[in-house]
Image (spheres, rainbow, N blue to C red):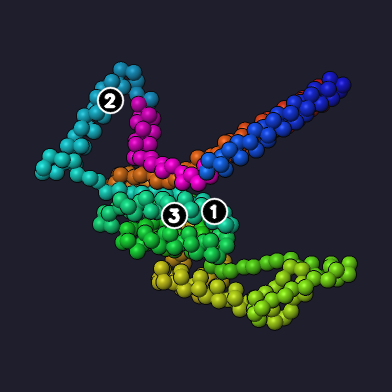
Amino acid sequence: MEFLSEYGLFLAKAATVVVAVVIIIALGAAAVQRNRGEGDDEGELTVRRLNEKYRKLREAIEGRMLAPDQRKAWTKAKHKAEKAARKARKGKAGEEETPSRTFVIEFDGDIKASDTETLRKSVSAVLAVADPERDEVVIRLESGGGLVHAYGLAAAQLDRIRSKGVKLTACVDKVAASGGYMMACVADRIVASPFAILGSIGVVAQLPNFHRVLKKHEVDYEILTAGEHKRTLTIFGENTEKGRRKFLEDLEDTHHLFKDYVSERRPELDIDKVSNGDIWFGTRALEVKLIDEVKTSDEYLIDACERSEVVSVGFQRKRTLPEKLGLATSAAFEHTVWRLLSTFRNQNLQ
């Protein structure tokens, strides 16, 4: 046990020194970057051809299943088929016809819809080249909802695609509820996996109130406002029935706006039936017409590869030096803790 104590103390000292040095370097680097204005980086456009990804995956499996003497003939036949396919796509002028395209955009939502900025840039990039006559946009959407104004803006970004006449499909593998469904309902077609969670067309607000605690300790809290409804419910002040009624009126009004928004984009819905805040799993969501098809996004995109060129579009922000150092510090700290726990566990097992 003495060895273990000494070893643990040494690792703790070493980790402390490393963290201190990294923090100093990170602070210096942050100051340099602020002076250089590197925080305004717009990010880098990323484009991936998914047809190639799925083709290579299929061919890798097919090739490895063949015997060595069969692989050469298989490769030759594959190249011949690819050449024939290119020739078949050529028009009368001898130039290869441009295939229809399916642009794939990812949205991973949190309570603040923080991915909206990336979504905005991706939509702008796609609309610059998309052809309404033959192209399609697929939004792979995952979100349990969040702030009303944040998800309202995210849904408005998808409305830009619809307003340009470009077909929009929403694919939901896990969850598109509340604000997430507000985004999904913009699409011409919603596709969801069998147990994806959809719906939750409702509005909720909650906050604690510490007025009685402050009153018990004889602490006064005053709120001065100009305007009858400038403040309805508060965290520290004494809430009134009048304030509660006004707050509920605002919630109801927001709920009506939400219902109207969904109804306009999916008129076939019985909005009163599905707007009570309930959620439905994928197969049940199909029954009440919250979605149009039960299928995973992978299935949908693999099928799309058969009829079009599928391209994933996104923006990846380059991490600043302090962020990189922060990630490295976090990883080093986790590794050190893991080593300490592993050593202690092994010592106890002996």
| x then y, percent, for residue 345 | 77, 28
Q: Is residue 102 left or right of residue 320?
A: left
Q: Which mark is residue 54?
A: none
Q: Can residue 340 be seen in the rendering of this structure?
A: no
Q: Amino acid at mark 3?
A: Arg
In the image, 216 versus 78, the foreground residue is: 216
**Residue plotted at (44% across, 72% down):** 263
Q: Secondary structure at mark 1?
A: loop
Q: Amino acid at mark 1?
A: Ser
**Residue plotted at (30% across, 48% down):** 101
| x then y, percent, for residue 47 | 38, 41
Please tell me in which quadrant of the rendered image residue 80 appears.
top left
| x then y, percent, for residue 192 | 45, 55
User: CB atoms at circles 2 and 3 under 8 Å apart?
Assistant: no
Q: Is residue 181 magenta?
A: no
Q: Which residue is mark 3?
A: 120
| Residue at far top of view | 69
| x then y, percent, for residue 86 | 20, 37
For the C terminus, the quadrant is top right
Q: Which residue is mark 2?
A: 74
2 or 1: tag closer to the N-terminus: 2
Crowd class of label 3 (few under 14; some 14 to 19; many from 20; radius 10 Å): some
Q: Which residue is mark 1?
A: 114
Crowd class of label 1 (few under 14; some 14 to 19; many from 20; radius 10 Å): some
2 or 3: tag closer to the N-terminus: 2
Which span of residues is magenta-colored? 38-63
